[in-house]
Image: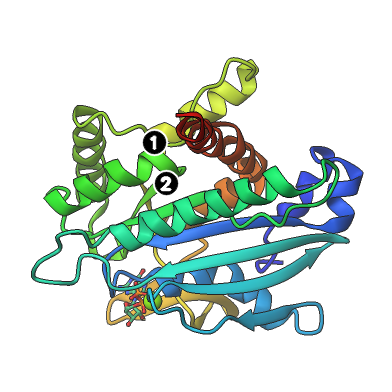
Amino acid sequence: ASSYVGFDSITQQIEHKLLKRGFQFNVMVVGQTGLGKSTLVNTLFASHLIDSKGRTEVDIAPRATTEIHNQAHTIVENGVRLKLNIIDTPGYGDMINNEGCWEPIIKYIKDQHSAYLRKELTAMRDRFIPDTRIHCCVFFINPTGHSLKPIDIVVLKKLAEVVNVVPVIAKADSLTIEERLAFKERIMAELQYQQIRLYPFDAEELDEQEIQLNERIREMLPFAVVGSERTVLIDGKPVRGRKNRWGVINVEDERHCEFVYLRNFLTRTHLQDLIETTAQIHYETFRSKQLLALKE
Ligand code: GDP
Ligand code: MG
C-alpha cells in the first residue's frame, strides 16, 4: 500500500530486545514558516496515521514557551513499533532581525544531550534511558533557485556541529527540473565552500555497499520534495498530490519529486545509522566536552 512507511525492514538489523520495546526516532524540522514543514511531516507519516486508525496513538504535547512543538506518534508495522517524535520549530528566520534566532533550536538539541548524560551518570548500567536526542534535523531550503541565504549558512553551520543535518529543497514543484538541478549544485558547492559537514558520514566500518549507498544519497542532496495533505485521483486511484491548473503532481511519483527518496532514506536505509551516528558522534562529542569541563 502507498501508506506503507517501511521501517519494519529494520528487523534484520536491530536486536530483539530493542524491537520489543520499540525504537525511538526523533526528527526535527527546521526552516522558515510557510516552507511546508508541517505538510511534509504529515505526508511522511500521516497517511499512515489516518488510514491506520486503531493501531496509532497520536499525542500532541502542550506548546512549549520556546515555541518548539513536540509531536509524538507511535506507528506499528508487522509487529515493529516505531515511536516517532517530530519536533517542529516554527518562527526561525522570520524576523527582520534574525540575530540569534537559531539559539532556541541549538539549545533544545543540547538540552536533550544533557538530559541523557545526566541519566547516564545516575542510572544503573542496564536501566533503560528514554532517548529524546535529535537523530535527524531536516533543514528546509526556500526554493528561490538562487542560493542559500546568509542566515541559512549560519544556522546550518551551528546545526551541523551538534546534529545530523539533511537539507531539502522545499516546495520543489515551484522549480523546473533544470532549475532544481542547478539550484542543488549551487547549494552543495556553497556548503562545501563553507565546510559544512552534512550527514551521511563515511565511517571506517562501512562496507562497500553502504559506501555506495551514501555516495548516491550525497549525489541527490538536497532532496527536492513536495508535500501534500490532500488526496487527488490519478487514473481513478487516490494518491497524495497537489492539483493546479496545469495538472497534478503525484507526491509519491519519483518522476515528479524526491519525496519517496527522502522517505526511504529516513525510514528504511538510514534510520538505524541516524540513531547510531547521533549516539556515537554527536552525543559523544557533547559528552566528552562536558566531562572534560567537570574535571577542570
Ligand atoms: P510550515 O510553516 O513550514 O509548517 O508550512 P506548512 O506545512 O504549514 O505549509 C504552508 C503552505 O504551503 C500551506 O498552504 C501548504 O499547503 C503549502 N505547501 C506545503 N507543501 C507544499 C509543497 O510542496 N508545494 C507547494 N506548492 N505548496 C506547499
Ligand atoms: Mg508548521
Residue 250 in view, yes or no: no
Residue 146 at what x, y percent from top left?
A: 12, 50
Q: Residue furthest toward the front?
A: 296
Towards the viewer: 48 or 127:
127
Q: Which residue is mark 2?
A: 166
Q: Residue at x 50, y 35 (%)?
A: 294
- Residue 55, relative to residue 135: is it above or below? below
- Residue 247, relative to residue 77: is it above or below? below
Residue 85 at what x, y percent from top left?
A: 60, 65
Q: Residue at x 20, y 32 (%)?
A: 194
Where residue 196 sits, quadrant-wise, is top left
- 205 left or right of 9 in image: left
Q: Is mark 2 within 8 Å of ligand 1?
A: no
- Residue 56, relative to residue 28: is it above or below? below
Amino acid type indicated by mark 1: Leu
Where residue 219 sits, quadrant-wise, is top left
Q: Residue at x 27, y 82 (%)?
A: 245
Q: Which residue is mark 1?
A: 198
- 286 left or right of 125 in image: left
- Quarter of the rendering occupied by the C terminus: top left
Residue 100 at what x, y percent from top left?
A: 20, 59
Crowd rating for badge 2 (residues with CA inside 10 Å; few <14, some 14–19, many 20+): many
Image quarter for ligand 1 = bottom left
Q: Decide: marks 1, 2 in contact (CB < 8 A)?
A: yes
Residue 76 at what x, y percent from top left?
A: 79, 66
Q: Residue at x 9, y 67 (%)?
A: 97
Q: Residue furthest toward the left?
A: 96
